[in-house]
Image: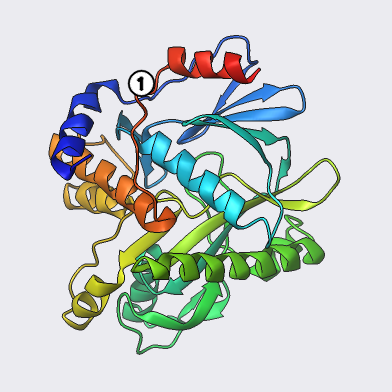
Amino acid sequence: MTTELLINQIKKQIPNAYLNTDLKGYGARKSGKVRDLYTIDDKIMIVTTDRISAFDVVLTQGIPYKGQALNQTSEFWFDATRKIMNNHIVAVPDPNIMIAQHCEPIEVEVVIRGYITGSAWRRFKYLKENNKTLVISGIEFSSDLRKDEKLPEPVFTPTTKAQEGHDEEITPKELISRGIVTKDILDQLTEAAFKLYASGNEVVSKSGGILVDTKYEFGLNPEGEVVLIDEVHTADSSRFWLKDQYEESFEKNLKQKGLDKEYVRSWLRDNGFTGDGVVPDLPDDVIINASLNVIKAYELITAQKFKPAEEYASNDRLMSNLMKYS
């Protein structure tokens, strides 16, 4: 499919963005920002919608094909990273669905950063401008860092997992002292996260990309083993840049153009929304470019051409595929 045909397809599906799941017969639905969860005996069904969140707020509009691209990106990475850590995935019966083993989530967002950008840069800039110690999540940063600069080595900047509102910056020591995790589990999370990040960067680099930063989530399976859950190296959980654009943009102090949802965040920020008040409507061109970013990220990461599902995501399609899986 040419880019022009893909753009036309995306535009056609803007009114049909898959936002609300209603899969009858699969138990109570629990809705997250992007995913809906259903319980099936000792398994959970994870449905990835076209919803998009920014500044911890779920927008009223969706991004066509976002759910499919995110789900299939995670499928790729869950398979590719089994050698580093086990995960909870059992089957993928539909482009927007994963069946997973039920796990007890570990209540921490494991964030690994290879570059000083995004929220970390904004925090760093605030601290520097107010003559405060340049410490983020217990890590002291060099005062001469420039925006988007590669860090000497990747860093772990965890946050709490807020059920409502904003995630909270926290240090590894505080995670233990507050009883959120034990030292043993934190050590396992940290070791796995750095290995996952290195593996991700190695794969993405071969396609001309940079895995700038990323978020991982972990859980305990019924046997008490720490496993990887949720999503891995997607355009929602990670920031990607293209190598050939990075150096020139960095040297000229230009805004980095990534294949992630920072594009939508930037548009919202430029239009006066940073999490409070009324969310402005996204224009069609912003929705189309956001969809293209998710699709390009999938292609960059997997080295596979994205193939839109023949039938667009809907409750009817998902129910049909679930019945075949059952």
Residue 160 appearing in the image: no
Q: Is residue 149 left or right of residue 280?
A: right
Q: Is residue 71 above or below residue 303?
A: above
| Residue 250: percent from left, percent from top | 24, 78
Between residue 323 and residue 96, name the one nearer to us. Answer: 323
The quadrant the C terminus occupies is top right
Q: Is residue 92 above or below residue 127?
A: above
Q: Is residue 93 above or below residue 106?
A: above
| Residue 170: percent from left, percent from top | 59, 63
Furthest-right residue in view?
223
Residue neighbourhood size for the residue with mark 1, other residues' Cα within 10 Å, grouped as few (<14), some (14–19), many (≥20) = few
Count of marks placed on residues: 1
Find residue 255 and report its image quarter. bottom left
The quadrant the N terminus occupies is top left
Find residue 251 and report its image quarter. bottom left
Between residue 183 and residue 315, name the one nearer to us. Answer: 315
State the residue at coordinates (25%, 45%).
292
| Residue 323: percent from left, percent from top | 59, 13
Say what amino acid the circle numbered 1 marks: Glu
| Residue 249: percent from left, percent from top | 20, 75
Between residue 225 and residue 169, name the one nearer to us. Answer: 225
Q: In the structure shown, which secondary structural element does the residue marked by tag 1 occupy?
A: loop
Residue 248 appearing in the image: yes
Between residue 127 and residue 186, name the one nearer to us. Answer: 186
